[in-house]
Image: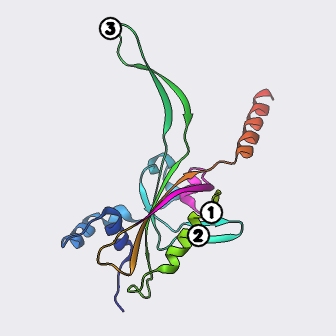
Amino acid sequence: MAQFNIKEILIRAALDYVGPHFPDWWKKNKQKYGLPDLSAINSKQLLGAKYFMQLKLSYKGQVFMLPNEPLVSIGLTKTIVKTVTVGKYKKGTVKEYINTDDYIISIKGVCVDKYDPEIYPSDQVKSLNELVDINDALQVEENAFFELFGIRSIVIEDIQFDEMIGESGMQKYTMKAISDTDFFADLNEKDKTKINLLA
């Protein structure tokens, strides 16, 4: 049975890199793609960075493990209204903060059967389709990376299954999701803050 590195395959798929010099590139850059010790890192340093990780999601007792440790990145944007100032010598704009949007989550992975890499991974693709078909929030299970941002549930927006030319036993996918906050939990938190301020 042929030996292969699933992380190397995922990097090649995610970066669309194909060429004879990949092994040399990997030797120089493989440190960037190791999962760090998340407990020692400030959450602000992690925004936008990509990390290999096991990602387990659940819905009403059904558990979905995303295949082969996908690459996950988390981003955040704010809504700011900029108003132009009037006057010949005035520069810049007045900024007004409106709100902070949901966290944007990107998940890139490859479906492949590590024990039989020549066979198309239909079970893994079917499991991903079942996950995307759930039109509700999914719980994030036991994930230190997501916990740093207070993300405990997500909603999947879309999934793309991309071509992998010449790789009949592999299926690349890209999933986009956003964080989901329980509205009632948010209201309870605001009420506790008001009580503490009045005390």
Q: Are marks 1 and 2 in contact (CB under 8 Å)?
A: yes
Query: Where are the magenta residues, as a range?
Result: 140-161
Image coords of residue 57 (percent x, y): 60, 65
Magenta stretch encompasses residue 123 = no
Mark 3 or mark 2, earlier in chain: 3
At 31% from the left and 62% from the top, the residue drawn is 15
Magenta stretch encompasses residue 141 = yes
Figure coloring: rainbow
**Residue under circle 2?**
130
Image coords of residue 22 (percent x, y): 23, 70
Q: Are marks 1 and 3 in contact (CB under 8 Å)?
A: no
**Residue under circle 3?**
89
**Residue under circle 1?**
134
Distance, label 3 to label 2, CA atoms, is: 59 Å
Point out the frontmost of discs 3 and 2.
Answer: 2
Helix, strand, or loop for circle 2? helix
Q: What label does residue 47 carry, if any?
A: none
